Image (cartoon, helix red, strand yellow):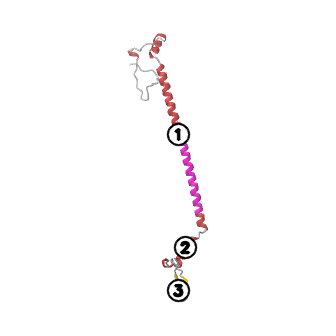
Amino acid sequence: MKEYIVEGNTVREIERDYSAPFKKPVSETVKKNREKAAHMNLGYVAFLLVMAIVLFVGCTAYINLRNEITEKQKTVEGLQSKVASLKLENDEEYDRIIGNVDMEEIKKIAMNELHMKYPDSGQVAVTESKDSDYVRQYKDIPVE
């Protein structure tokens, strides 16, 4: 809405500056500091440029490392899956082989064809093994 003022026989439009009452007076020091802050010198620009390059290189290296880690995790998962599958196949093959063994047939062949027999009480030597159920004999077992 425009406002008019009547002076004598002429009517003039009033121009109002609404920002004037809210502005505080600014000192010369503040004006100089604002001008100085608005301009960037060569050293500051060089510093910002170097920091931007360092940040870019760091981010790129980080992303590459994350990608490598992800690929290696996928490789490890694939290998673990392969190991599990091979273990399952191995167990199945072992069970199949054990299932086909007839212990009575082995006993008959050992006793009849190979003339083997059960040991007498004095022929058995008991030894202890901490590692496994397999014992290697490097010298004769002493007789009691």
**Residue range corresponding to the magenta coloring:** 48-72
Residue name at image x 53 percent, y 41 percent: 74
Most extreme residue toward the bottom is 8
* Element marked by disc 3: strand
The C terminus lies in which quarter of the figure?
top left
Residue name at image x 45 percent, y 17 percent: 103
Give the Cα separation between the discs numbered 3 and 1. Answer: 91 Å
Q: Amino acid at mark 1?
A: Val
Residue name at image x 49 percent, y 30 percent: 88
Q: Nearer the viewer, mark 1 or mark 2?
A: 2
Q: Is residue 65 magenta?
A: yes
Q: Is residue 98 magenta?
A: no
Magenta: main secondary structure equals helix
Of mark 2 and mark 3, the one earlier in the sequence is: 3
Of mark 1 and mark 2, the one earlier in the sequence is: 2
- Residue nearer the viewer, 39 or 41: 39
x, y percent for residue 48: 58, 63
* Element marked by disc 2: helix
Q: Residues within 10 Å of mark 3 (few under 14, many from 20)?
A: few
Q: Locate residue 81 relative to residue 125 in the image: left or right.
A: right
x, y percent for residue 122: 39, 16
x, y percent for residue 25: 50, 79
* Element marked by disc 1: helix
Q: Residues within 10 Å of mark 2 (few under 14, many from 20)?
A: few
Q: Amino acid at mark 2?
A: Arg
User: What residue would you read off at disc 3?
Assistant: 6
Location of residue 100 with respect to 75 vertically, above or below: above
Q: Quadrant of residue 68?
A: top right
User: What residue would you read off at disc 2?
Assistant: 34
Q: Which mark is residue 76?
A: 1
